[in-house]
Amino acid sequence: MGATTCAAIEDAPDLTLVGRYDAGDDLGDLGGAQVAVDFTVPDSSPANVAHCVERGVHAVVGTTGWTAERLETLKDTLAAHDSVGVLIAPNFAIGALLMMSFARQAARFYESVEIVETHHPGKVDAPSGTAARTAEIIAAARAAAGLGPVPDATTSDPDGARGAEVGGIRVHAQRLPGRVAHQEVSFGATGEALTIRHDSFDRVSFMPGVLAGVRAIPEHPGLTIGLEHFLGLD
């Protein structure tokens, strides 16, 4: 993702790439950048982003695995640098953002819903940030509509076959070679089903969203979760 992002920025006529950094590199003053893009791993990202904020550099973050505690720490850091903006986006693919938007619309109409996400086996966290974010969005929409828990008669599942539970929504993660990023949201009601699916076959699919985040973040100080807020999909 980092290499693909660097190439996309170099190809953008209105942006200039001023630095590339890999694991173990000294970030220094970040080459005097206005905006830094972080695609690393959950254990590294918070320190990288804090380094940016403390130097007045806006950040666009595609690293997943940000816990509530880490987000609160970041908010405290941003409070001391109130002109700096940080965007943390679980997914930058426009189609994935539309998938989440459509799922929000559908959630109040269906009794049941489950999520299946598939990624390459090199991904270190599960469920994906996109799946977790989708589950949170669906859970909020269901709660606003006054829907109760998703019906499920399972009382015995010692091996976890029913998957993880995020906000009361079941999420199943697959890791398979040859895949990049894929998600399916399945809704069910008596006599019908609705399936919303998005597939990213190449990392270039994320680049329009990354560039949109880079261009917009200087105008949005503070913490923003989700690129949808910059695209009118919220």
Image: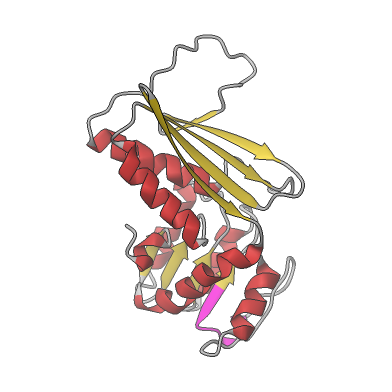
Q: Residue furthest top?
A: 155
Residue drawn at x 52%, y 57% as measured from the top left: 91
Residue 82 lies, with reference to residue 113, above or below; the image says: below
Image position, residue 55 (x, y; %):
50, 78
Report the front residue among 82 and 133: 133
Report the front residue among 71 and 112: 112
Residue 181 lies, with reference to residue 87, above or below; the image says: above
Image position, residue 15 (x, y; %):
54, 87
Image position, residue 10 (x, y; %):
63, 84
Residue 142 covered by magenta stretch = no
Report the front residue among 20 and 156: 156
Image position, residue 112 (x, y; %):
39, 27
Residue drawn at x 27%, y 28% as measured from the top left: 147
In which quadrant will I find the N terminus?
A: bottom right
Q: Residue furthest front?
A: 191
- Specify start and end residues of the magenta stretch as a single range: 30-36
Is residue 148 visible to us here?
yes
Residue 32 covered by magenta stretch = yes
Residue 60 lies, with reference to residue 173, above or below; the image says: below
Q: Is residue 148 left or right of residue 129?
A: left
Q: Residue furthest right?
A: 177
Report the front residue among 26 and 208: 208
Is residue 125 visible to us here?
no
